[in-house]
Image: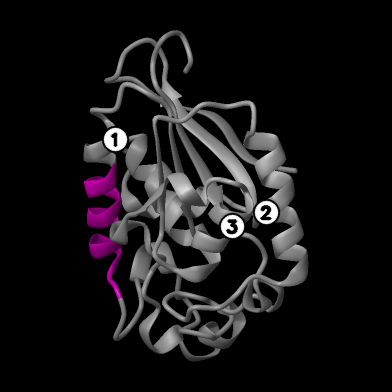
Amino acid sequence: MFDGLPAVYLCRHGETPWSVTGQHTGLTDLPLTPAGEAAAVRLGERLRSLSFGRVFTSPLKRAHDTCKLAGLGDRAFVEPDLVEWNYGRYEGLTTPEIRREQPEWHIFEHGCPEGETVAEVAARADRVIAKLRAADDDVLLFSSGHFLRMFAARWLGLPAYAGAAFHLDTTSVSILAYERQKHEPVVRLWNSCC
């Protein structure tokens, strides 16, 4: 809580084999690496002193396992809208590989062929935000990088392409809250790593 108003804590999942190589990991359900598991445990130590009214996680293993290793798995509800971007034909590819085919491609502007459009991912973020605006307690979300970047842009009322400006590392913590009233959304902390 900040000034009596609830906050939304965002946790990006721990390291996976594809986050190490820079491959786009949408719906491929990869496990955490040993380093990712260790970072998730450290994340739990960092979150231990905080109190959350609700905890939500993406249905994907990497987010759910990060939540569990952080010690919050028994309190978490799976929220399907927190799933990562469906990269379609670009699943498993790196950005340089995609740009060999589409030199001007940018996910927050063009979406993914045979996957999700920018508008579809923004709509999912907006649905989650609508649910959380009614919360009276702090809420914790576990999800993936591109979705959480979209979530931050939409939280602030920015257009979807603004998600490109919010870099996120694995196992990072970010906090979205309000300035003085619930109609004044702000970023309190971004991409803080343990």
Q: Nearer the viewer, residue 144 or 47?
A: 47
* Residue pointed to by mark 1: 132
On the image, the x and y values in percent for residue 52 come to 46, 30
Circle 2: element type: helix
Circle 3: element type: helix
103 versus 37 height, above or below: below
Q: Earlier in the sequence, mark 3 or mark 1?
A: 3
Q: CA distance from mark 2 to mark 3?
A: 5 Å
Instruction: Tell me which segment is drawn in magenta.
Output: 116-128
On the image, the x and y values in percent for residue 111 come to 35, 71
* Residue pointed to by mark 3: 66
Tag shown at residue 40: 2
On the image, the x and y values in percent for residue 164 come to 48, 54
- Amino acid under disc 2: Ala
- Amino acid under disc 1: Leu
Q: CA distance from mark 1 to mark 2?
A: 24 Å
Mark 2 and 3 residues: CB-CB less than 8 Å, in contact? yes
Residue 20 relative to residue 97: left or right: right
83 versus 40 height, above or below: below
Q: Earlier in the sequence, mark 2 or mark 3?
A: 2
